[in-house]
Image (cartoon, helix red, strand yellow):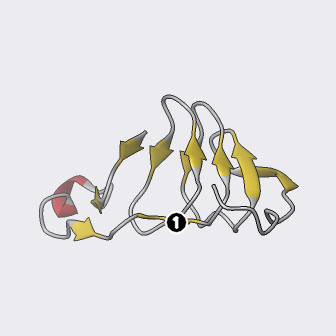
Amino acid sequence: MTLSTAGHPVEIDERYDFITHAPILIEDDVWIGAAATGTPGVTIGRGSVVGVGAVVAKDVPPLSVVTATSVVERERLRPASTATF
């Protein structure tokens, strides 16, 4: 996964004046497919799966499966049993 924690404005005159930074939080038991990208400030919730090539531009709810470039939530997963991993 590519983790991009900085961003900047699109306007040419502002590109170097307003660089922003925000952390990316990846909670426990998350699986991330190849070539996925996380953008600044997002949280990937506990137990979620991020599909191959997904661009995570908004928070991923816990126990979700997300794919595509706009983070399309495909399904909501059930919580794990009390068994430990």
Q: Residue at x 54, y 57 (%)?
A: 57
Q: Position of residue 9 (x, y in %)?
A: 30, 61
Mark 1 surroundings within 10 Å by alpha-carbon count, few (fewer than 14), some (14 through 19), many (20 or more):
few
Tell me the residue that label 1 is attached to.
Answer: 27
The C terminus lies in which quarter of the figure? bottom right
User: Which quarter of the figure has residue 18?
Assistant: bottom left
Kindly give the residue lying farthest to the front in the view shown: 83
81 on left or right of 31: right
35 on left or right of 16: right
Q: Residue at x 27, y 60 (%)?
A: 8
Tell me, yes or no, if residue 11 can be seen here.
yes
Between 14 and 24, the one lying in front of the other is 24
Tell me, yes or no, if residue 70 can be seen here.
no
Helix, strand or loop at label 1? It is loop
**Amino acid type of disc 1?**
Glu
Instruction: Relative to 69, say whether 35 is above or below.
Output: above
User: Which quarter of the figure has residue 1?
Assistant: top left
Q: Residue at x 84, y 57 (%)?
A: 77
Q: Residue at x 82, y 64 (%)?
A: 81
Q: Position of residue 69 (x, y in %)?
A: 62, 41
Kindly give the residue lying farthest to the left in the view shown: 16
47 on left or right of 18: right
Q: Position of residue 52 (x, y in %)?
A: 61, 31
Between 60 and 9, the one lying in front of the other is 60
Between 8 and 14, the one lying in front of the other is 8
Instruction: Relative to 21, say whether 13 is above or below.
Output: above
